[in-house]
Image: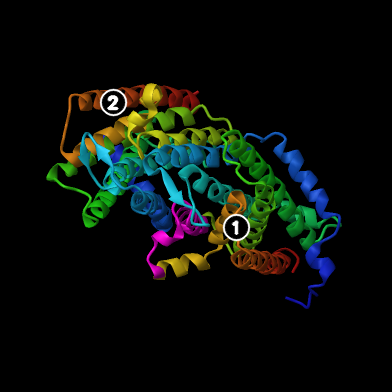
Amino acid sequence: MTLTLVGATRVLLLRNYLSYKSAWLVFLTGFLEPVFYLFSIGVGVGKLIDSFEVNGHSIPYAEFVAPGMLAASAMNGAILDSTFNMFFKLKFQKLFDQMLATPMTTTNIAVGELSWCLLRSGLYSAAFLVVMVAMGLTHSWLAVLALPAALLIGFAVAAVGMALTSFMRSWQDFEFITLATMPMFLFSATFFPITAYGSWAWIVQLSPLYHGVALVRAANTGVFTVACIGHVLVLLAIAAVGMTVAARRLGKLLLS
Amino acid sequence: MTALPLTSAFLIGSRRSFRLVERNLYVYRHGWLVLLSGFFEPLFYLLGVGFGIGTLVGTVAGPGGQEIPYQLFVAPALLASASMNGAINESTFNFFFKLHYDKTFVSILATPLSSGDIAVGELIWALIRGGLYAIGFLVVMFVLGLVVSPWVIFAFPAALLVGFAFASVGMAATSFMKSWQDFDLIQLVVLPLFLFSATFYPIETYPPALQLIVRLTPLYQGVDLARMLTLGTLDAGPALVHLVYLLVMVVVGHVLAVRRLTRRLVV
């Protein structure tokens, strides 16, 4: 029996859906995290900030933080399933070995798991967008474009996450993931403009989340510049490299 | 549960609890990397929120009413929350693993150690870990010029007390946990505590009703205490309330944890 890529992806998504059905709480916490930050930093700390200007326009601080948190929620949606859970399935549950005993191929598995991450990213960001609309933090219909941007973030993060996970030896190595995502969350122009870094701004540009945040922010303000093309290309390039490495490593780990 | 007396020796444990500390020390000798993120987390937040967002905020009213730089306002709060986070990580996630999967405690009970020894030993270990983080962060504060009062010395025991309180309560809560999914409930409690306990803005920012609620939450006690000590604006009344609150957490959490551990492991 042969399995098309679409068919295989559908089966894997169904499998993940079934196994997550009893763990819906995990979904809730991942979504609530950036919402809590929006209220604490965006609204709370925002009250301490008298006037906040971006590109010469004075806007409420929460309006600046919100797109950053939407991008972070997209990252949140992709990271857990592509790193921690992926490692569990790979090394402990031996889930992928079992799947390979079916007509599924390693590519099917990689694409399927990636689609799952994207689905989760998309759900989180869509829910976050609803929160933003409810709080009056969006101003144009173009804000809907934040969703494809969020998917792009999820794609890049999940691909890199999977690639890195394939090199992990033990749970302790995940400490590096925490040590990488935490500063990314805080320093990707999420909470203050990149101009605050002065001549160190180039380091921030190394963070994939920074490019995501910039895209979501552009969508929210409805002002797209040429730089946006650059952000899209960077995220696509990261995703492509991650995917190539992940697919190659998975084949090596599972088939040999 | 049969009448297992909650005698003082039973609750406080014996010198044997240090064997458990020793055991953890050996285990972590190969996994010291795990200790890194506990040190970097408050540091990143201090740089990102304190100094970063601080460029937008400027100064903020401290507990004594005086205007202070924003990073000085945030630093003690991060010290207290780092203690909470460290204690919760050790007393919930790791504790659960040892209790249910590794069966470490079952093996330990086959030795002369009692469940009281285990609870006390794990608490001491959580305190050592929390203490290391606190010292590390205080050094960072000193290097970044955020030490402004000699009272800051007492911020260290205050941070330890916060860790002690959350470790006890965390252990008690973990003894009720059935699966890993229950840990998301802990995250759902810890994250709002971290973000809303007047950590990043003065409590006066809230409307009065919310202020009252925040004043009743556990981390706020630690944050306010650490802030008063770091800034040297100690107000005896509130400080005493914070101390008593945290001590009650320690006692209630510990008694409950020992009782539950005994029921799960011995009977």
Q: Mark 1 and mark 2: span between their CA atoms?
A: 48 Å
Whether residue A21 sits left or right of residue A94 in the image: it is left
Whether residue B61 sits left or right of residue B113 in the image: it is left
Q: Provide the residue designation for mark 1.
A: B225
Graded by Cα atoms within 10 Å as few (under 14), some (14 to 19) or many (20 or more), the crowding at tag 1 reads: many
Magenta residues, dominant SS class: helix
Q: Provide the residue designation for mark 2.
A: A236
| Residue sitting nearer the eye, A139 or B242 | B242
Graded by Cα atoms within 10 Å as few (under 14), some (14 to 19) or many (20 or more), the crowding at tag 2 reads: some
Looking at the rendered image, the quarter that the C terminus of chain B falls into is: bottom right
Q: Position of residue B139 (x, y in %)?
A: 64, 37
Q: What residue appears at the point 64 percent right and 66 percent down from the top-left corner?
A: B240
- Tell me which segment is drawn in magenta: B181-208
| Residue sitting nearer the eye, A253 or A157 | A157
- Which quadrant of the structure image shows residue B225? bottom right
| Mark 2, secondary structure of its residue | helix
Say which chain tag 1 marks: B
